[in-house]
Amino acid sequence: MQVTNNSNTEQQKNKNARQNTATQTSADENVKAAHDQAEADIEEDPDLNSEPDPTADLDEGELARLDNGNDEKLDV
């Protein structure tokens, strides 16, 4: 009877190991899919865009100097 218990225990360990490997593979696939989706969302989000606006850090005077060349001359 002792041999049967050891055999069953060994079979159960093997079964558990296979299930753990399958679960880990599934979890890895889910993590990769979530990461890929997050990357796609970040690329589409203008607030998270990696290309900053070159005028974002300028004060009013600096912006006015940049915009001066674009002003239309008004005839009064």
Image (cartoon, rainbow, N blue to C red):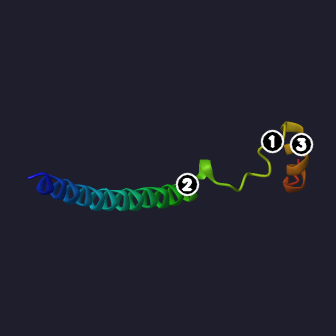
**Residue 74 in sight from this viewpoint:** no
Q: Quadrant of residue 30?
A: bottom left
**Residue drawn at the location 60% of the way across and 52% of the way down:** 46
Residue position for label 3: 62
**In the drawing, does residue 72 fall left or right of residue 48?**
right
Q: Nearer the viewer, residue 43 or 72?
A: 43
Q: Residue furthest top?
A: 60
Tell me how far mark 1 sits from mark 2, CA to CA.
22 Å
- SS at badge 1: loop
Disc 1 vs disc 2: Cβ atoms closer than 8 Å? no
- SS at badge 3: helix
Q: Residue 31: x percent and y percent?
A: 43, 56
Label located before the other in sequence (1 or 2): 2
**Which amino acid type is marked by label 3?**
Glu
**Residue drawn at the location 41% of the way across and 59% of the way down:** 28
Residue position for label 1: 57
- SS at badge 2: helix
Of badges 2 and 3, the one in the foreground is 2
Residue position for label 2: 42
**Residue drawn at the location 37% of the way across and 57% of the way down:** 24
Could you classify mark 1 by the number of other residues whose Cα lies within 10 Å: few (under 14), some (14-19), or many (20 or more)? few
Q: Residue 41: x percent and y percent?
A: 50, 56
